[in-house]
Image (spheres, helix red, strand yellow):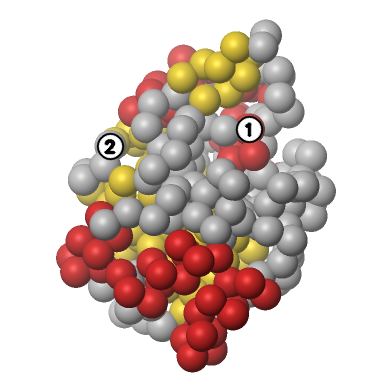
Amino acid sequence: MRITYFGHSSFRIETGKSAIIIDPFFTNNPKDPRDFKTAAEGATHLLLTHGHEDHIGLEPGKDIKESDAFKICAQLNRAVTVVAGFELATYLEHAGVKNCESGNPGGRISFDNFDCVITNAWHSSSVIKEGKALYLGNPVGFVMIPKTERGKTVYISGDTGVTADMKIVNDLYRPAIGIVCIGDRYTMGPDQAAYACRRLFKFKTIIPCHYATFPGLLADAAPFLRAMGPDRKKVRALKPGESLTL
């Protein structure tokens, strides 16, 4: 399994024959403003945790068809499958995305190389149009369970505060890898994220995200590493563009 970080909360996970893009944010990404065509080349799946512009690659106020999420499907690979909450998936379908698999927390969607379990996330989900928020359903996280022999189960927190549900996710699926938001203000900060990683999960590898992108977010991963204490050795704070093979 190979995981590539594109900055903020955007990742590419390659497992078996699947190439999965998570929360594409290439347009206007100040940390890794690469072309979406390069990052998503050969993508088979697109996992969207919620509809905020910094998770679908949309400039505020622009039409959904100008988002990275839409362009990956419409311009790059019309066969890519989008996995998202019901409202966001339906919104993309009405915009013209052909292959959407919608679900809600508690549900499981099965694909050839992996299963995707949808989890709770404590956040919000909308895009801003003409100064008004367009509601796009509940935000979600994911547990990605590879069907390949060497694959590892991955928990993707999405944007969330710490919740007791996380222990249930660990008890049921035992994810070895955690992709966890740490940036504070809009999501878990370093203290909550470290509590979740140390007390509610038993990750072997932790990849922090959603920090150091905009003013107001945690500037670097150092406070999270300190909060992790003796478990800091599990943390891999990837630089934008860096990959990790597990």
The residue lying toward the viewer, choosing from 101 and 56, is: 56
* Number of residues whose C-alpha sits closer than 10 Å to that of mark 1, classed few (under 14), some (14–19) or many (20 or more): many
Check the image and report above or below for 189 versus 201.
above
Foreground pick, 17 / 122 = 122
Relative vertical location of residue 163 with respect to residue 220 in this rendering, above or below: above
Q: Can residue 71 be seen in this snapshot?
A: no
Residue at 53% across / 89% down in the picture?
A: 233
In the rendered structure, are the residues bearing label 1 and label 2 in contact, judged by CB atoms less than 8 Å apart?
no
Whole-percent x and y of residue 184?
A: 58, 53
* Residue density around tag 2, few if under 14, some if 14–19, many if 20 or more, within 10 Å: some
**Looking at the image, can residue 163 be seen?**
yes
What separation in Å lies between label 1 and label 2 (alpha carbons)?
Answer: 20 Å
Residue 121 quadrant? top left
Q: Give the x, y percent position of residue 53.
A: 63, 32
**Is 176 left, or right, of 33 in this rendering?**
left
How many numbered marks does the figure carry?
2
Residue beneath label 2, please? Answer: 104
The residue drawn where x is 67% and y is 75% is: 222
At label 1, the amino acid type is Glu
Say which residue appears at 79% left-offset and 55% top-offset: 31
Tag 2's secondary structure? loop
Mark number for residue 120?
Answer: none
- For the point 81% across and 48% down, which residue is it? 30
- Of residue 11 and residue 115, the one placed in the foreground of this image is 11
Q: Which residue is mark 1?
A: 53
Where is residue 4 shown, x and y percent of the image? 62, 66
Helix, strand or loop for disc 1: helix
